[in-house]
Image (cartoon, helix red, strand yellow):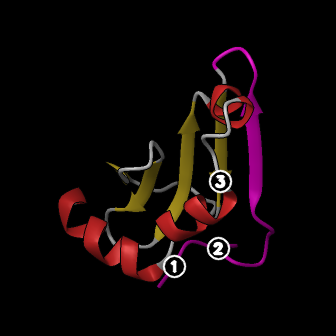
Amino acid sequence: MGVEGDWDKPMKIDYDRQADVLYITLLRGKRSCRYVENGHGAILRIDRVTSELVGCTIPMFSRRVSHGGLDIPEIGDALSTEALAELIPAAR
């Protein structure tokens, strides 16, 4: 049971220059989400019904990149299945 078009579309990445926020969307469609800070400064969007990771919001993106504070493996680790399993109960 999922939202139509969940995985048939590629991941979407948007950057809001004025707000300096990077938005990564993994699952599209209208969803009711919980928001959980992952401890690395990213905000995870988790589907309230399925507990699937819908996306990730990274505030102060350019500042993190320019100061060496954003490491791609760090984001990958934050989005790993194990990390999500620990965070999802906090989102309920």
Q: Is residue 34 above or below residue 83?
A: above
Q: Which mark is residue 36?
A: none
Judge depth for marks 3 and 1 and give the one in front: 3
Q: What is the x, y in percent for residue 4?
A: 64, 73
Q: Residues within 10 Å of mark 3 (few under 14, many from 20)?
A: few
Q: Disc 2 versus disc 1: distance between alpha carbons? A: 7 Å
Quarter of the picture containing the C terminus is bottom left
Q: Is residue 64 left or right of residue 34?
A: right
Question: What secondary structure is found at the residue carrying circle 3?
Answer: loop
Q: Is residue 68 left or right of residue 49?
A: right
Going 60% across and 40% down the picture, which residue do you hit?
69
Q: Amino acid at mark 2?
A: Asp
What are the residue bounds of the magenta stretch? Answer: 1-19
Q: Nearer the viewer, residue 71 or 14?
A: 71
Q: What is the x, y in percent for residue 35?
A: 35, 48
**In the figure, residue 87 lies in which quadrant?**
bottom left
Contact flag, marks 3 and 2 (Cβ < 8 Å): no
Residue found at the very far bottom of the displayed protein: 1
Q: Disc 3 versus disc 2: distance between alpha carbons? A: 27 Å
Residue wearing tag 2: 6
Residue wearing tag 1: 2
Residue found at the very far front of the displayed protein: 68
Question: What secondary structure is found at the residue carrying circle 1?
Answer: loop
Q: Which mark is residue 71?
A: 3
Contact flag, marks 2 and 1 (Cβ < 8 Å): yes
Q: Is residue 13 above or below residue 49?
A: above
Q: Amino acid at mark 1?
A: Gly
